[in-house]
Image: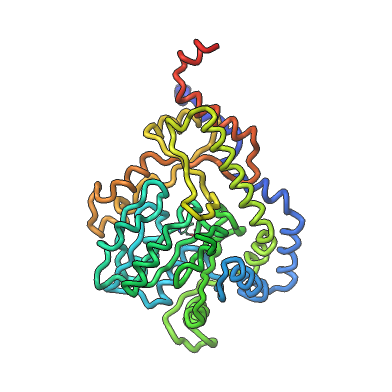
Amino acid sequence: MEAAAAQPAQPAPKLLFPFLDLKAQFDAIRPELLAAVESTFESQSFILGPEVAQLESEIAQLTGCRFAIGCASGSDALLLALMALGVGVNDEVVTTPFTFGATAGSIARTGARPVFVDIDPGSYNIDPALIERAITSRTRVIMPVHLFGAPAAMEAIGDIAARRNIAIVEDAAQAIGASYRGAPVGSLGALGCFSFFPSKNLGAAGDGGIITTNDATFADRLRVLRVHGARHKYSYERIGMNSRLDSLQAAVLRVKLPHLAGWTALRQRNAARYTTMILSRGLERFVTLPVAPDGCTHVYNQFTIRTEHRDALRDHLRARGIPTEIYYPLPLHTEPAFLYLGYATGEFPQAERACQQALALPIFPELTEAQQSAVVDAIDEFFAPTSARTEER
Ligand SMILES: *Cc1c(COP(=O)(O)O)cnc(C)c1O
């Protein structure tokens, strides 16, 4: 018989609450959600259909755009937007290396080359001052990401794009409801791309995405591209794909959409509460707080602080049952999938530093003041030398 296994290392302590509590959201709207699902089954219409068309017009309205075209995911929204612009082999698309993989992945999938530009360390978004020197005769698109829910510097980006006759595709996957100087994200470029992944501010019960535009030609093209490139069944006008939004997802999203403004306000309240708690304890000496860029509405898909002691702080918080996440552990130019681009470590120092220092705290709408206090208490405990604490008492 085998000897009894050695005691495993201490099990990870139980979290006091989840990083994102989607169950709390479900509990609050359960009857409407289940009724919407049931009525979709009654209709037996599962692909596109009236729920999708209605959601599209509601999202168009929310984003101040003439058109919205549903698709299967935020990643597909980016890919379809680039396809609608005719981006492909020999083209270049300028974007940030501090983002989710799909941003650059969608560019690479068209055959075009992702060209990275470093971020502004304050906003975590692409630094417009560095864009111009990355532009070549092959540059077709600038793809800013409104990371964590904060709009990118769209005025400066728009100036460059207009001067160079380059299109803008917004990766607004994390920023539904955010606005830049009064203009909703999604309406600030040729095409805006949103994700309904469950963890986004407006999340489906699975995958989903949508593309917004004011251009009737792009809208028409996208409606063809998402159904195999066929305007009519078996009449293939373009090489398209199968990327539709399910009726079930649209029905779920239509139940949630009227709550979005309220949920966003709660995220903003939570952000303000963290800020107050952190400042009132003088912790801003140790951690940098996120800021909403001037004149912008930040919708806090994430509340990201930064510190040189990120990994140790994260371990300390986890030991006290406080959930955190790292967005993102590696900048895309150092990820295996993008090494073929030939960038070296050190080329995008701000993105690289953000990957080492950024730490996302829980910010979901249902988070309570007591839970936030527990988070900030644990941060305080990490930074305040234990001895000094003891003496105080
Ligand atoms: C979530 C996300 C995507 C991709 O969306 P999916 O719906 O998961 O495909 C793209 N870009 C960013 C910045 C994202 O956060």
For the point 40% across and 72% down, the residue is 82
For the point 45% across and 25% down, the residue is 383
For the point 51% across and 71% down, the residue is 243
**Color encoding of the figure:** rainbow
* Quarter in which the C terminus is drawn: top right
Residue 220 % position (x, y): 51, 82
Of 211 and 64, the residue lying toward us = 64
For the point 66% across and 47% down, the residue is 23
Check the image and report above or below for 148 versus 314: below
Check the image and report above or below for 204 versus 375: below
Residue 172 % position (x, y): 49, 61
Report if residue 228 is visible in the image. Answer: no
* Image side of residue 252 versus residue 98, left or right: right
Residue 176 % position (x, y): 55, 59
Of 93 and 35, the residue lying toward us = 93
Of 70 and 305, the residue lying toward us = 305
* Image side of residue 8 versus residue 348, left or right: right
* Image side of residue 329 versus residue 369, left or right: left
Image quadrant in which you'd find residue 157: bottom left
Of 44 and 376, the residue lying toward us = 376
Residue 246 % position (x, y): 60, 69
Check the image and report above or below for 206 versus 65: above
Report if residue 173 is visible in the image. Answer: yes
